[in-house]
Image (cartoon, rainbow, N blue to C red):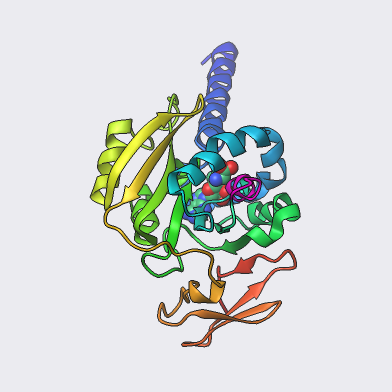
């Protein structure tokens, strides 16, 4: 092989490896490499997330918080679960809404994203609690929440159907579900659904009425109601809904500002300096 051909070959190989790396780590955010890589990438980029997204808080309140509060009216004090809360976008939007008198529990598997969530929410910190745990096994009993949300995250989960099932399991009958659906991307084959497919998936996990709605260039909002009816849950103490992820029997009880304890198996969860409850792992 001539020197020139060798150079062309090496150049092409380097470009192909670079393109593959870009696709695996940047364009598809690690989703084809498994949950650990996805979470590692969010941990690494957590400090840049808010700057990159540049959420316009007035729009967040207008297009997220207001329609949620309108959909659950006359209830004003919902217990809300925001799964894959990231840097606390949804808890903040709700906290800024003038009719919201509820409480939001935000869970995420990226500890660094949660750290920034505690900073985002700071002026309204009484309205939200953040918990470090995976979306695949939510540490709450069935039918615990009035509203469950999961924004811009399902496509980065390795088993989105299992997560959808969990979201609906912890939602009370008649409760409101809000998820988003990634659109307009060619870089995530097999990871995105059409509006019809999402609605079909929702039906299969127990959602009655649902509707998809255009929202942003990259995402649709999909609203749903869990089949059946029940009384609103309303704001509750965390120790009434936080179940031990280890034994799945007892509830976690607050011991002091730094420690929660399972009343049944004795496993303990630390509370970080920033107030995040660390269920991943227990000790
Ligand atoms: C694009 S961000 C969206 C954050 C927030 N919902 C928003 O709209 O700004 C995706 C989030 O999903 C979280 N995530 C990904 N896989 C997860 C999993 N299996 N369990 C919990 N969180 C997960 C990531 O850590 C990240 O914070």
Q: Residue at x 51, y 24 (%)?
A: 217
User: How far across and how far down the image is residue 44, in percent?
Assistant: 67, 47
Q: What residue range appears in magenta? A: 90-99
Name the dominant secondary structure of the magenta segment: helix
193 or 188: nearer the eye? 193
User: How far across and how far down the image is residue 108, in percent?
Assistant: 55, 56
Q: Within the magenta stretch, is there residue 268?
A: no
Left or right: where 245 falls relative to 114 = left
Left or right: where 63 falls relative to 58 = left
Would you say residue 236 is visible in this rendering?
yes
Q: Residue at x 65, y 79 (%)?
A: 259
Would you say residue 55 is visible in this rendering?
no
Quadrant (top left/top right/bottom left/bottom right) for the C terminus? bottom right
User: How far across and how far down the image is residue 152, in percent?
Assistant: 50, 40
Examine the image and state in which quarter residue 26 appears: top right
User: How far across and how far down the image is residue 272, in percent?
Assistant: 70, 68
């Amino acid at each position: 092989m001539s020197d020139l051909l060798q150079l062309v070959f090496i150049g092409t190989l380097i470009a192909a490896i670079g393109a593959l790396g870009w696709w695996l780590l940047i364009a598809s955010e690690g989703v084809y490499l498994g949950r650990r890589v996805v979470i590692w990438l969010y941990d690494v980029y957590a400090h840049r997330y808010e700057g990159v997204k540049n959420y316009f808080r007035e729009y967040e309140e207008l297009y997220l918080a207001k329609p949620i509060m309108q959909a659950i009216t006359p209830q004003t004090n919902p217990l809300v679960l925001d799964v894959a809360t990231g840097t606390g976008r949804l808890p903040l939007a709700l906290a800024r809404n003038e009719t919201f008198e509820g409480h939001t529990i935000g869970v995420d598997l990226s500890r660094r994203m949660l750290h920034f969530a505690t900073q985002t929410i700071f002026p309204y910190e009484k309205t939200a609690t953040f918990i470090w745990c995976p979306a695949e096994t939510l540490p709450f009993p069935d039918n615990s929440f009035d509203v469950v949300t999961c924004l811009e995250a399902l496509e980065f989960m390795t088993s989105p159907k299992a997560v959808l099932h969990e979201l609906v399991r912890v939602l009370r009958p008649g409760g409101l579900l809000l998820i988003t659906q990634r659109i307009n991307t060619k870089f995530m084959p097999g990871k995105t659904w059409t509006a019809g497919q999402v609605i079909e998936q929702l039906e299969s996990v127990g959602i009655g009425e649902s509707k998809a709605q255009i929202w942003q260039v990259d995402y649709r909002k999909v609203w749903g109601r869990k089949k059946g009816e029940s009384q609103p849950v309303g704001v509750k103490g965390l120790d009434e809904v936080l179940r031990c992820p280890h034994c799945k029997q007892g509830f976690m009880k607050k011991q002091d500002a730094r420690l929660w304890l399972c009343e049944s198996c004795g496993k303990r969860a630390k509370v970080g300096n920033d107030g995040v409850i660390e269920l991943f792992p227990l000790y």
